Each structure stands twice: as structure tokens, then as C-alpha cells.
Image (cartoon, rainbow, N blue to C red):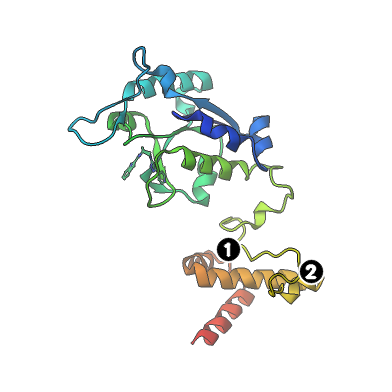
Amino acid sequence: MRFDVITLFPELFAPFLASGVTRRAYASGQVAVVLWNPRDFGEGNYRRVDDRPFGGGPGMVMLAEPLAQCLAAVRAARGEPEAEQAPLLLFSPIGQRLDHAGVERWGQGPGAVLLCGRYEGIDQRFIDRYVDAQLSLGDFVLSGGELPAMALLDAVARLQPGVLHDAGSHAEDSFNPALDGLLDCPHYTRPEVWQGAGVPAQLLSGHHAQIAEWRRAQRVLWTARHRPDLIDAARAAGRLAPADEALLAQEQGRAL
Ligand code: 9WO
């Protein structure tokens, strides 16, 4: 699939696209990323992309016209028939919260066009006319939409076949509803004792069934403690086994 990213700071993406387990997905075009700078479509000799807000106030607002021209160039390059156009996504705190289901939704099919805002924001008329969905990472404000765009790209890229070293790896991720929507279990590596702290004996036992049972119990108990909402969702979806319920009942008895 293909993502076109509209950003005044395309250089922020270079080290991100060239690093980590996802690098090959971008380099091979498995997740193709094409960067576009609205400044290339800016107004006048200074290639202006922003202006002062009507009504006054601090800061600058991104001009609609350079964004519209940039988007037209993106649409032409993608060459999609109008009915099959990839969605234009804007990252903003007023958007719908991005979660695993959203990553799967936006990371399928043709991909998407990602618009990264800067300054105080974007002329609302451009948003009303062209933006298909607004996505939020949470209730906080950034200085630009680039980090959320990279977050979506990263989450999409690691779901692609062959990106993670071992094929089972992301099947076991937290928030993968195909599994059970529970949090991951804690991880340990060498040394066996670090600053006086040991490693759970089950992990050192070499008994695969015992290890799997311990990990499942940890996932259930950690999720119950840290994200009880996810336990409720897992139960509602029928993803908790009788053994999980027994464990939770036992833990609740201990807490009372
Ligand atoms: C900022 C903002 C703040 C309160 C209510 C609505 C808002 N919209 C925006 C906005 O679209 N800002 C643009 C993108 C321009 C300034 C930097 N931008 C931004 C995106 N800041 N923070 C985000 C963001 C995106 C996704 N998840 C969390 C924060």
C-alpha cells in the first residue's frame, strides 16, 4: 500500500523511514511512503504557505490554496479513480482516538494520504472540503502532525507480513483482537539476577507448557490490574477461558 504524507518538514521522516525493523517495509515499497511539501505549491516568490488568522490572535494559519494544489498533485500521482480514492487523514486532538482497529482500518487497501498540520492549524475551509477523517493519539497538543503520522505508519508497517523477525511475534501483541485483547506479559533477559532481583522461576524451568501457562496468567492479571476495561471487553467477546476466570476470581478473593 501507499501513503502520501503532506508536511512542511519532510526531513523529519528520513531517519524514521531508515531505521528499525520497519525500514525494509518502507524501502521495498511494501509500505510505500511519498513525501510532499506544501511549500512547493506556496504563493509568490517566497512560496508562502501561511498567513495571519482572521479575527486576530497569535500565530499563523496554513493557507488552504497551497494545500489544495499539493493535494491535487498527490491525487494525480496516485492516479486513483475518484470512487476509489484513498482517504485524506488529518492528525488533530479533535479527531477520533486511534487504536488497533483504526490502524487496521486505515492501513488496509490503498493506504491513505496523511496531512500534517503546523502553526496554529489549517484554514477550516480546506478541512471541510477535503479531509475525510481526523485522528487523535490522545488529549494533548503537539507542535505538528508529523509524530502522529509516523506513529500510524509505524503501527501499519509492523503489521505487514515478514516485517517482524518471527512470524508469531505480532500475533501475540497487546491489543491484537485476533488474539484476545489482553496486555502483553512482562519480559526478562540476562542476567538471571540483576541488582538482587531474580527472574520468575517458571521462565527458567524449560517446561514449555508451564511457561505458556505462567505467561497467560500474567497477561490476565496484569490486564485486570492496569486496564480493567480491557478485561471487560475480552469477557464480553468471549475471549476469557474458564481458567482465566478462575484466576481472576482467586485474585479478587485475595484483594478482598
Ligand atoms: C490543534 C488543536 C488543539 C485543540 C483543539 C483542536 C485542535 N486542532 C489542532 C490542530 O489540528 N493542530 C494542527 C496540528 C496544527 C498544530 C499542530 N497540530 C497538532 C496535532 N497538534 N497536536 C496534534 C495532535 C494530533 C494527534 N494526537 C494528538 C495531538
Give the image location of residue 145, x and y in percent.
43, 38
Does the beta carbon at disc 2 come under 8 Å from ligand 1? no
Binning the other alpha carbons within 10 Å of mark 1 as few (below 14), some (14 to 19) or many (20 upward) gives: many
Point out residue 48 in the picture as x, y percentages from the top left corner: 35, 20
Cα separation between marks 1 and 2: 20 Å
Q: What element does badge 2 sit on? A: helix
Nearest the eye: 81 or 20 = 20
Residue topped by disc 2 = 208
Query: What amino acid does circle 2 point to?
Result: His
Residue shown at 72% from the left, 69% from the top: 212
* Residue 256 percent coordinates (x, y): 48, 87
Q: Label 1 belongs to which residue?
A: 183
Q: Indicate whether 51 appears above or below 200.
A: above
Nearer to us in this view, 62 or 83: 62
Residue found 39% across the figure and 40% down from its top = 143
Q: Amino acid at mark 1?
A: Leu
Q: Earlier in the sequence, mark 1 or mark 2?
A: 1
| In the depicted structure, whether residue 217 falls above or below residue 127 | below
Q: Secondary structure at mark 1?
A: loop
**Residue in view at x 38 percent, y 33 percent:** 131
Hey, which residue is sitting farthest top in the picture?
A: 45
Q: Is residue 202 left or right of residue 170?
A: right
**Taking 230 as reference, is 47 above or below it?**
above
Give the answer, above or below, for where 246 lies relative to 230: below
- Tell whether circle 1 marks a residue whose Cβ is less than 8 angstroms from ligand 1: no
Residue ranking furthest to the right: 206
Tag 1 and tag 2, C-beta contact below 8 Å: no
The quadrant in which the N terminus is found is top right
Q: Residue at x 48, y 69 (%)?
A: 228
**Residue 104 position in % (x across, y down):** 54, 45
Q: How many numbered marks does the figure carry? A: 2
